[in-house]
């Protein structure tokens, strides 16, 4: 059965800047960047948040006249198609972007599951793909030539800041659970390695299947294991369900860590989100000295201007995708070409020379990202506060957290 695809959406900010050599940007052939976005399914919230970050970058770069290649500034067109959070749909949609839409390069879709499904198509067609959210280390172990993670740190590094923060708080025993998909598995594996290296006892390491809605058995196993801290890793929707079921069953731990617990949409669940630990790259108290693109305050200003009716505020997915655009701009400028091999060479050459809204950029020859480390937050009654690392701490952690019966 043929897959019905929506019409593409093009984002072009008009401008009249005169490029070097006398050519006007609006007269030059645009740089077409393809990506897929989930309109429905498990990845929809995060994918659409990331899309808004990419759109901010397009708006900004076009307002400056475009990206100079060969003495001519070329504007950017973002070509978007729907992947419906379905990894079986992704290869066909990326093939459509390449063969029918004739894009010059691509952003990956949201997450490791969908990106892993896209990369074979982009590689087969010799197209450069920039990852903004996928973190699974396995992507960089396949020998792909034209893949670069612009802002998203490798998965096995993502869970380590949280474990380090708990070690500082005196945690001795920690229970892990994870969705059986590449990103949660990679994060959990790295976190377990870190916990063991710091002398913690890992009391549980359980995986659960996609589509799980009743987590009570998993929660009870974690409680029975004697863990001080419970760290279940999945995507945002699943983590919201687990948070609610923790409260419904009065399953008290000294601390609970969810990757997404400080996201605006997660905070909207109210009391179920109180005192949870989480991680982020975007907070009004985290401000890098940016060398490429807009800084945090400028991105927030642009977000408010472009998306006044957005259901949720900007989050770290927004920042990751915006930062990826800022890196892409530098890569194209350095390469002076849209050829995949030249873009990859430029991406490697720029390693350790760029700081974006999410922090320093550092990759190896496989395109794997090593920097952009997350800060750890806790949801206090007055809102999230940074509790790790020490350089950016804004409040002392509440640990152990109050039992559910004592929360107002």
Image (cartoon, rainbow, N blue to C red):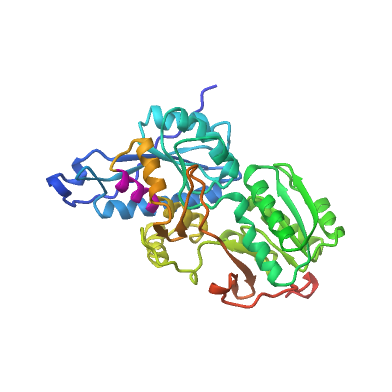
Q: Quadrant of residue 40?
A: top right
Q: Is residue 183 above or below residue 283?
A: above
In the rendered structure, the answer to whether residue 394 lies left or right of residue 198 reads left
Q: Is residue 361 above or below residue 70?
A: below
Residue at 17 percent across and 46 percent down: it is 24
Residue 38: x %, y % from top left: 52, 42
In the rendered structure, the answer to whether residue 183 lies left or right of residue 352 reads right
Magenta stretch holds residue 330: yes
Q: Quadrant of residue 96?
A: top left
**Residue most extreme to the top:** 1
Residue at 64 percent across and 51 percent down: it is 187
**Residue most extreme to the left:** 22
Image: magenta residue range: 326-335
Residue 153: x %, y % from top left: 54, 53
In the rendered structure, the answer to whether residue 347 lies left or right of residue 400 reads left
User: Taken as a whole, is the magenta stretch helix, strand or loop?
Assistant: helix
Magenta stretch holds residue 62: no
The quadrant of the image that shows the N terminus is top right
Does residue 85 show up?
no
Does residue 239 show up?
yes
In the rendered structure, the answer to whether residue 16 lies left or right of residue 354 reads left
Residue 92: x %, y % from top left: 50, 28
Residue 408: x %, y % from top left: 72, 75
Residue at 46 percent across and 35 percent down: it is 145
């Amino acid at each position: 059965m043929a897959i019905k695809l929506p019409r593409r959406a093009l984002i072009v900010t008009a401008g009249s800047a005169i490029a070097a050599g006398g050519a006007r940007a609006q007269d030059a052939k645009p740089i077409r960047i393809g990506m897929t976005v989930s309109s429905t399914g498990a990845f929809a919230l995060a994918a659409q948040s990331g899309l808004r970050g990419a759109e901010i970058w397009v708006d900004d770069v076009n307002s400056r006249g475009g990206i100079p290649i060969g003495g001519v500034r070329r504007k950017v067109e973002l070509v978007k198609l729907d992947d419906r959070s379905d990894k079986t749909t992704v290869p066909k949609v990326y093939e459509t972007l390449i063969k029918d839409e004739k894009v010059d390069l691509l952003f990956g879709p949201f997450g490791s599951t969908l990106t892993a499904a896209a990369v074979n198509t982009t590689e087969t067609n010799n197209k450069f793909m920039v990852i903004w959210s996928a973190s699974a280390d396995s992507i960089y172990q396949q020998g792909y030539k034209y893949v670069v993670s612009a802002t998203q740190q490798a998965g096995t590094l993502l869970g380590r800041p949280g474990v380090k923060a708990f070690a500082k708080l005196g945690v001795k025993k920690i229970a892990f659970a994870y969705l059986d998909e590449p990103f949660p598995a990679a994060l959990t594996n790295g976190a377990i390695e870190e916990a063991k290296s710091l002398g913690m006892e890992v009391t549980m390491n359980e995986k659960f299947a996609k589509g799980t809605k009743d987590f009570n058995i998993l929660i009870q196993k974690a409680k029975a294991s004697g863990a001080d801290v419970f760290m279940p890793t999945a995507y945002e929707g699943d983590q919201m369900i687990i948070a609610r079921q923790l409260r419904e069953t009065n399953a008290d731990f000294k601390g609970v860590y969810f990757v997404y617990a400080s996201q605006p949409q997660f905070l909207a669940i109210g009391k179920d989100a109180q005192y949870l630990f989480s991680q982020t790259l975007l907070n009004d108290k985290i401000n890098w000295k940016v060398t490429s693109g807009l800084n945090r305050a400028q991105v927030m200003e642009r977000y408010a201007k472009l998306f006044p009716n957005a259901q949720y505020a900007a989050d770290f997915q927004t920042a990751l995708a915006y930062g990826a655009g800022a890196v892409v701009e530098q890569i194209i400028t350095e390469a002076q070409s849209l050829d995949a091999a030249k873009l990859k060479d430029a991406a490697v050459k720029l390693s350790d020379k760029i700081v974006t809204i999410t922090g320093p950029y550092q990759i190896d020859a496989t395109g794997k990202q090593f920097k952009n480390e997350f800060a750890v937050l806790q949801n206090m009654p007055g809102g999230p506060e940074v509790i790790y690392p020490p350089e950016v701490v804004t409040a002392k952690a509440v640990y152990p957290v109050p039992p559910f019966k004592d929360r107002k």
